[in-house]
């Protein structure tokens, strides 16, 4: 039951740090464990990331769907300096995400360091954990630097 102990520890960290995301995720996984709904692990392992990204994209697109953001607003924004920087930031982020996905496929154990880093970022920096892919992408970006020092 080492997994249960880790999940309980994460639940406590989430409660102490007042992070509803950590506490809820740990609670849901504890429920899965104690109700023997183990098929959910397989589902989450295979499709959890896609499901999370789907909900993130839905959230981002709500202002378009409900009319809060109009086509004219988008056009004006895209030709402004912040809009151009946002396009560059989006392109850079997706590039890093792709590198992160490659890193996770090559070295899946590295996810635990990213989870710990995310928890530390939530607790001490009041950050928001939007995705392990970005954490993996940033990690992948720094890996060549590490290789330079290992020589």
Image (spheres, grey):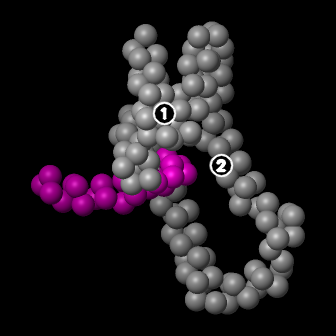
**Earlier residue among tags 2 and 1:** 1
Identify the residue position indicated by label 2 in the image.
Answer: 53
Q: Quote the CA–CA distance across marks 2 and 1.
A: 25 Å
What secondary structure is found at the residue carrying circle 2?
Answer: helix
Q: Is residue 15 magenta?
A: no
User: Residue at 65% across / 36% down in the picture?
Assistant: 47
Given this view, does label 2 or label 1 mark the residue nearer the observer?
1
Q: Is residue 144 magenta?
A: yes
User: Residue at 40% across / 45% down in the picture?
Assistant: 123
Left or right of residue 24: residue 72: right
- Residue 96 higher or lower than 105, as above or below: below
Q: Nearer the viewer, residue 99 or 49?
A: 49
In which quadrant of the rendered image does the C terminus lie? bottom left
Identify the residue position indicated by label 1 in the image.
Answer: 15
Residue 117, x across and y down, in percent:
37, 45
Q: Nearer the viewer, residue 89 or 6?
A: 6
User: Residue at 41% across / 25% down in the picture?
Assistant: 9
Q: Provide the residue span drawn in magenta.
A: 127-151
Decide: few, some or many residues near mark 2? Use Cα within 10 Å; few <14, some 14-19, many ≥20: some
Whether residue 99 is visible: no
Quadrant of the image occupied by residue 112: top left
- Residue 67 higher or lower than 127, as above or below: below
Residue 52, x across and y down, in percent:
65, 44
Left or right of residue 117: residue 145: left
In which quadrant of the rendered image does the N terminus lie? top left
């Amino acid at each position: 039951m080492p997994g249960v102990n880790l999940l309980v520890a994460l639940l406590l960290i989430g409660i102490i740090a007042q992070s509803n995301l950590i506490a809820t995720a740990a609670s849901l996984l504890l429920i899965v464990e104690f109700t023997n709904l183990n098929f959910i692990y397989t589902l989450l392992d295979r499709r959890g990331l896609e499901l999370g990204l789907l909900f993130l994209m839905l959230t981002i697109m709500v202002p378009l769907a409900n009319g809060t953001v109009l086509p004219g607003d988008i056009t004006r924004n895209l030709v402004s300096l912040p809009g151009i920087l946002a396009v560059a930031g989006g392109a850079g982020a997706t590039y890093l995400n792709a590198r992160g996905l490659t890193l996770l496929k090559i070295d899946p154990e590295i996810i635990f360091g990213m989870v710990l880093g995310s928890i530390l970022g939530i607790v001490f920096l009041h950050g928001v954990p939007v995705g392990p892919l970005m954490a993996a992408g940033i990690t992948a970006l720094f890996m060549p630097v590490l290789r330079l020092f290992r020589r």
